[in-house]
Amino acid sequence: MTKKRSKCLFVVFSIILVICLIASFVNFTYPFTINGNYYSYSNFVSNLKLGEDIGKTYRIVYRAELPEGEAQANYNNLKTSTMLQLKDIVQSEGYEDVTVTSYGSDSILIQIGNILTIDDENEIVDLIGAPAAISFSMSSENTDPFAGPKDIDTVSAYDYYDSSTGETIYGVLINFKEELIDEIESATADGGTVYIFLGDTQFTSMDLNSSAITNGQIFMQSDSFVDHASANTVANIIRTGMLDLELTTVESDSITPTYGVGSNIWMAIVMAVLILIAFIFMIVKYRDLGWLACFNLLFFITISLFLLQSIPLVHMNFAGMIGVLIAFMFVIDSFMSIFDKAKEHYNQDTKLYVAMKVAQRECLTKTFVMNVGLMIVGLICLFMPSLAISSFGWATFVMSFVSIFCVQALQRLFIKMYLALNSTDGKKCNFHKGGKHA
């Protein structure tokens, strides 16, 4: 490799690294609009999903009862399906750290982790906090309703732009089951007012004029729908009211992290300090090669953050953080093994570029086996039922892959690029002929 090409590659990789660091640690708003709206970018660190021990958890207990007319023998099956549907509803809103379990003989416990702000907590309360069965009646007394929760196929928040008023209209679009369309048309044949109830309370009413509901669809509107979020809140209440069992909230509260409210902040500070110490140690001990290792370690950190925040099943708790530190130390040990072996050969009067190549070849098996071993440990932990152990498993499993890539691919390339600029002067790497300062 020529010196010119080596310098160009260092510039290119430096630019890539700056982009990776910005993507990992910087939040910003895009300087342009999309359909008239400004959008923000959330960095990799912000998108890490925190486990229950270092992130706030919201907890709700529901009493789950059979609907009228349902046989007791079906209770367990209906309870299982209700728990699965509850989990789907919450995860569809972007909350991946969800645990839904049976609580006693007639209750369901749902826990949602990684609650970062009061807005998150309020959103969850709106999302599943107060399920209510919807019903449709032509009477303001809700007598003889013509449709209920079991007659609905889909529910979704919906909005459209009304060009006549210049306003956006928000509402909830409800589609009834296809087999009930004729029945609903018959019930509303004379037109009039449809009264919509959530539980025992009238939520809104809609004037059909003299028309019947012929398409099996109602666009439910209300003065309370001031934006998409408020319409979606009611849509979610309706969804939970459509579940196989009737749910009543028994209790709900938030649980602070096991390791304290600021535990994730303190852990981030501790990890940053340890990384800084590792960088200083590598630079002092190996000089140019230390800078090269730090350059590679930054790639290791940013690639690992990208993967850890991208995989939905990864939740970083205290054990996961320990796994991250172990994987990081393994990478440093791999670099030190290569550099120390090169130093040993150079001290025995071997040329620098030969010493580096021989050291990489001799350390190949050791570094590969070490990282594969950590990967296997992580893989085993993935199948453990404990969230703490599985978090440790994900961290070590994912970062072992990145470690192998950085040590066996990137580092080889970077050393080759460095040797094109300095192939003889070992003093720049703190190497000395004849064992001096060894």
Image (spheres, grey):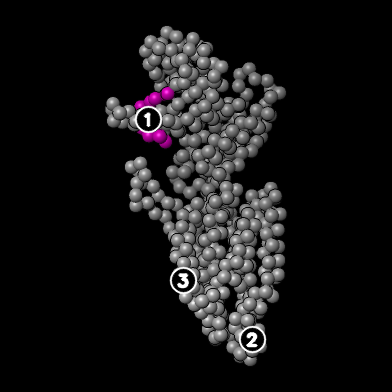
Q: Position of residue 105 (x, y in %)?
A: 67, 32
Q: N-terminal of the two: label 2 or label 1?
A: 1
Residue at figure coordinates x 43%, y 12% from the top left: 212
- Vertical relation: 50 (above or below) 150: below
**What's the amino acid at mark 2?**
Thr
Q: Quadrant of the C terminus?
A: bottom right
**What's the amino acid at mark 1?**
Tyr
At label 2, counting other C-alpha atoms closer than 10 Å, the crowd grade (few under 14, some 14-19, many 20 or more) is some
- Residue wearing tag 2: 350
- Residue wearing tag 3: 8
At label 3, counting other C-alpha atoms closer than 10 Å, the crowd grade (few under 14, some 14-19, many 20 or more) is few
Q: Position of residue 311 (x, y in %)?
A: 57, 50
- Alpha-carbon distance for marks 1 and 3? 52 Å
Instruction: Judge left or right: residue 431 versus residue 168.
Output: right
Where residue 160 is drawn, which disc sits there?
A: 1
Residue at figure coordinates x 61%, y 73% from the top left: 335
Main structural element of the magenta stretch: helix, strand or loop?
Answer: loop
Secondary-structure class at tag 3: helix
Secondary-structure class at tag 2: loop
Q: Which residues are magenta?
A: 219-229
Q: Position of residue 164 (x, y in %)?
A: 28, 26
Which of the pair 96/269 is nearer the observer?
A: 96
Q: Position of residue 218 (x, y in %)?
A: 44, 21
Q: N-terminal of the two: label 1 or label 3?
A: 3
- Alpha-carbon distance for marks 3 and 2? 29 Å
- Alpha-carbon distance for marks 2 and 1? 75 Å
